[in-house]
Amino acid sequence: MSLTPTATAPRGPAAAPSATPTAHSRRRKRRSTRAPWFFLAPAMVFFIAFMVIPIVYAIYLSFRGQRVESGGAFGRRVETFIGFENYVAALTDAEFLAGLGRALTYGAIAVPSVLGLALLFSLLLDTPRARFTAFSRTAIFIPYAVPGVIASLLWGFLYLPSTSPISSIARSLGQDSLDFFSYPVLYFSLANIALWSGVGFNMIIIYTSLRAIPTEIYEAARIDGASELQIALRIKVPLVAPALVLTSLFSVIGTLQLYSEPATLRPMTSTISSTWVPLMKIYQDAFMNDNLGAAAAASVVLALGILGFSLAVLTFFNRRTFGGRS
Amino acid sequence: MTAPRITSRTGPRSRRAVVGGLLGSALLVGALTGCSADWSEGGDVTLNFWTWSLKGGDERAEAIIDAYEKANPGVTIKLSEVGGTADTSSKLLAADRANEVPDVVQVEYRALPSLVVAGVVKDITEGVGPVKDAFADNIWDLTTLNGEVYGLPQDIGPMMLTYRADRFAELGVAVPTTWEEYATAAEQIRAADPTAYIASFAPTEFAFFASQAAQAGASWWESDGEEWTVGVDDDESIAVANYWQDLVDRDLVKVEPLLTPEWNAQVNDGKILSWAAASWAPSVIYAVAPDTAGAWQGAPLPQWSAGDPAVPFLGGSTYLIPEKSKHAEEATKFASWLAGSDEGAKLLLGLDLYPGATAGREATKSAAPPLLMPEQTDFYELTDQIISDSTIPLTWGPNVNVAQTALGDALQQAALDGTPFADAFATAQQAIIDDLAKSGYTVAK
């Protein structure tokens, strides 16, 4: 009540909705149409230079291919327009689909375990009786700071029979060395790398969202006689559901973009082919087979698939979790 | 109480962000409009040399560069190691499209045709006439496609078997001279020491399978100048597939890629007892298992039919001049000197390479054996004999890169699933033909 006059006082004319509102607002509108563009300009320049142009170029490339026109057995390959040939090849490529299947199998193991552990750790850190939370949080987060390639190398050495301490213990107990690269163990070995490096990051997101929950709710629950476990399951988990949706979406997208772990482990084993996941196939086409067109087409297909999937997931959860309408 | 107070801070922060953004975009525009300047000054030439044999920081390599720069004032050689053949090829393709090419590039012979048809390699037939005589014909032919010369042979790979002489003796196994004896030796080794294998079977060793099939009489690529004939699934090649299938099925060889930490550990531990490859193998083994030096020896590659010593070369590399090099003339001169002159060839021998030029080959006769087998004083006499026996010409097609992955992946899968290796060879055959046809080459039916 007492705030209202002080807030409106300096705006004399605005407080009185009469006189000449049209002229005033028009002038203001003109000024406001230019200002956003000015502020947007830097972002737009970067967006166009590093997003729009590369995407347009990739789409352009996806319709091109290296073809021989003349010159016999060692005729030169020249870049030409080949229509939808690359798309037909990408969509009918059994290896591309098989790679997608392998990535999803990996994701089916990795995503629930990463998010489950991340949720568990963040709930534990958020309990009132937790000690050394700052240290634990950092300790769990640190592996995320290790680049994926290095993490894969580290784990690769832990998996290889001759260098693995686990296999060494198994051998000293009279067992055989464990083969971490055979099927289906390979999927778990790869998921384990994701688990090691991914839990910390997802934990931080969920934990941050947990800290944003007003503590009054917990107090109310405690007065009603709820135990810490009940508070965690009935209050915290539902309230961090948006964060969970977000982290799962990121994780699934990450799954479809799986590359560095299998690519790094590939030289160590003969169970990972050069086209093991979609991105490895795309890399192979682009840089080993000198077929940028096919790589671009496969990338466009993959990107559209991920985009469609993300939109579907977000639309679905927008209604259920975020309570919004779309 | 816990209400977010971010709003009060947006003012100054976003202003700073805008300034930063504007500055950033200004820099970006500058970067986009600024074109690459050519820094070469009048007369002085810098040759960018992509190689893995001459390593920057290695005294022996520096000495080679110094020798050339001293004899050719105004020329500076810049060494870059960009990876092995596969990496070098892909980077060269990218460099060519970006118009920022090096001047001399080392690749293995098998990568040359695919780079030539990509339009990346310069035809240097005109410039290399004088050095042609420095090479034996079977070596010079390695870089000639359709009568045009596209490279200067740096080093060659006479095929041989490098084996653990001490372990073979200990287990009472004779050195195999034929592939049949090799299978028997593999069996004896498994029987005498169940933890050891004669060798690893590496499904991705494309060049080895191609060479071994050629030794059996196959020809994976063949052309009359117009039409390609692909023979990855001809009878001789299928015989190679079946041969390894049998050894893998009986667990006489270990399915394991080469030079993995696992392979290195097994070699160090004396669990992998041989490597059928070429004369460059000793220096590779020495790099990963220096402690085993003295325990190894080299022998001629086992033969398909006893008494027929003919083999192709395996591996080895060439210097090519990129089509878009701005200093092609100087680059050709340098590459000719290094690969073809008496001085250059002898210096290459100092890098543990087997030089392609005849002068280098002569120099090996008075050279000490490789560090891995210091006691095998007749090592270079042996390799010299093998080079004379390397009479099987091997044609690499324009899509070796595609073939390599196709066969590697198919063989890996077959080894994993226990399906016939012959089918993997047939799969690769089809992939190679399809790719040739798709690119627009004529393929014989």
Image (spheres, grey):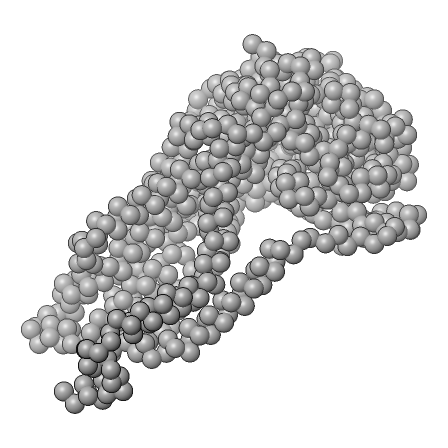
Q: Name the residue: 27% across, 87% down.
A: A10
Q: Percent x, y for residue B63?
A: 85, 50
Above or below: residue A229 compared with residue B77: below
Q: Percent x, y for residue A178?
A: 42, 42
Q: Name the residue: 46% across, 62% down.
A: A41
Q: Nearer the viewer, residue B167 or A191?
A: A191
> Would you say B24 lies left or right of A233 here?
right
> Would you say A38 lies left or right of A318 here?
right
Task: Name the residue at the top extreme.
Answer: B445
The image shows a total of numbered marks equal to 0
Q: Name the residue: 42% across, 43% down.
A: A180
> Would you say B409 lies left or right of B31 here?
left
Q: Which of A245 and A89 is in front in this view?
A: A89
Q: In which quarter of the image is the N terminus of chain A?
A: bottom left
Q: Percent x, y for residue B80?
A: 72, 49
Residue A182 can be seen, yes or no: no
Q: Which of B94 and B167 is in front in this view?
A: B94
Residue B327 can be seen, yes or no: yes
Above or below: residue A212 compared with residue B194: below
Q: Name the residue: 61% across, 29% down.
A: A78
> Would you say B165 lies left or right of A129 here?
right
Task: Name the residue at the left extreme.
Answer: A224
Above or below: residue B258 compared with residue B206: below
Q: Percent x, y for residue B217?
A: 66, 13
